Structure formats: structure tokens, C-alpha cells
Image (tube, rainbow, N blue to C red):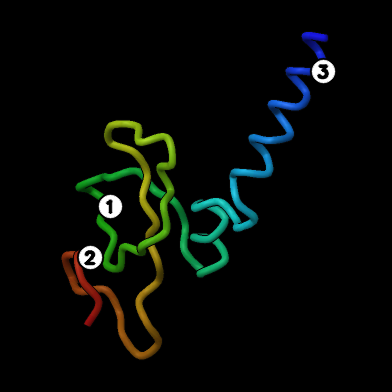
Amino acid sequence: MKLATLLLTMMLAACSSGSGASGPAQCVAAGGQCILPNPNNPCANPGPQNCNPDLNPGGAFCCLPCPSGTHANDAGTACE
């Protein structure tokens, strides 16, 4: 009985998690990559995708490439 309850709970959790892709998968699909904050390697175009679903302190965020026709500025902090 305990095994059946556990399996049912797992199935319900899987169903309630939504049918969408995870934040990291959405980031990759948008052409970006999940990176950790690093002042020596800034991101010029942070994306809205959630690369830190567990809300870890200092967690990853999505860094997207600059839009077509633009490039990162010399500091790497913005697209221009």
C-alpha cells in the first residue's frame, strides 16, 4: 500500500509540474546558456528564462547572445 501511495504521489507531482520545458531547456532553446554570475565574464544580454528553479543563492541565469546586428560592448555588460 505504501508503494502504491508513493507511485500515485509521484505521478501527480509529474502532472502538476506543467507541460512546458524547464528554464534551462528554455534558455538553450532561445540560443543561450545558463551561467553563474561572474564579474570576470559578464553577460551582455541576460534572458528571462529561469536557470535557477531551486532559488540557490548566487544561482545561474540565462545569458542570451546579442540580437542580430549588435555586439557586446567592450565591458561585456550590454549589447550595442
Q: In this view, which residue lies farthest toward the left? A: 75
Which residue is the site of mark 2? 76
Image position of 75 with respect to 13: above or below: below
For the residues labelled 1 and 2, the Cα–Cα distance comes to 8 Å
Give the residue displayed 36% in from the left and 62% down from the top: 48
Kind of residue at disc 1 = Asn
Image position of 73 with respect to 15: above or below: below
Q: Work out whether mark 1 precedes mark 2 in sequence or the reverse, and give the earlier one.
A: 1
For the residues labelled 3 and 1, the Cα–Cα distance comes to 49 Å
**Residue 26's mark?**
none
Q: Work out whether mark 2 precedes mark 3 in sequence or the reverse, and give the earlier one.
A: 3
Residue 80 location in percent, x, y? Answer: 22, 82
Residue 51 location in percent, x, y? Answer: 43, 48
On screen, residue 36 versus residue 77, left or right, reads: right
Which residue is the site of mark 1? 41
Q: Nearer the viewer, mark 2 or mark 3?
A: 3
Q: Nearer the viewer, mark 3 or mark 1?
A: 3
Residue 10 location in percent, x, y? Answer: 70, 28
Disc 1 on helix, strand or loop?
loop
Kind of residue at disc 2 = Gly
Give the residue displayed 59% in from the left and 44% down from the top: 17
Give the residue displayed 82% in from the left and 18% down from the top: 4
On screen, residue 17 versus residue 79, left or right, reads: right
Q: Work out whether mark 3 precedes mark 1 in sequence or the reverse, and give the earlier one.
A: 3
Q: Are marks 1 and 2 in contact (CB under 8 Å)?
A: yes
Q: Quadrant of the N terminus?
A: top right
Disc 2 on helix, strand or loop?
loop
Which residue is the site of mark 3? 4
Kind of residue at disc 3 = Ala
Query: Is residue 71 or residue 15 the one in the foreground?
Result: 15
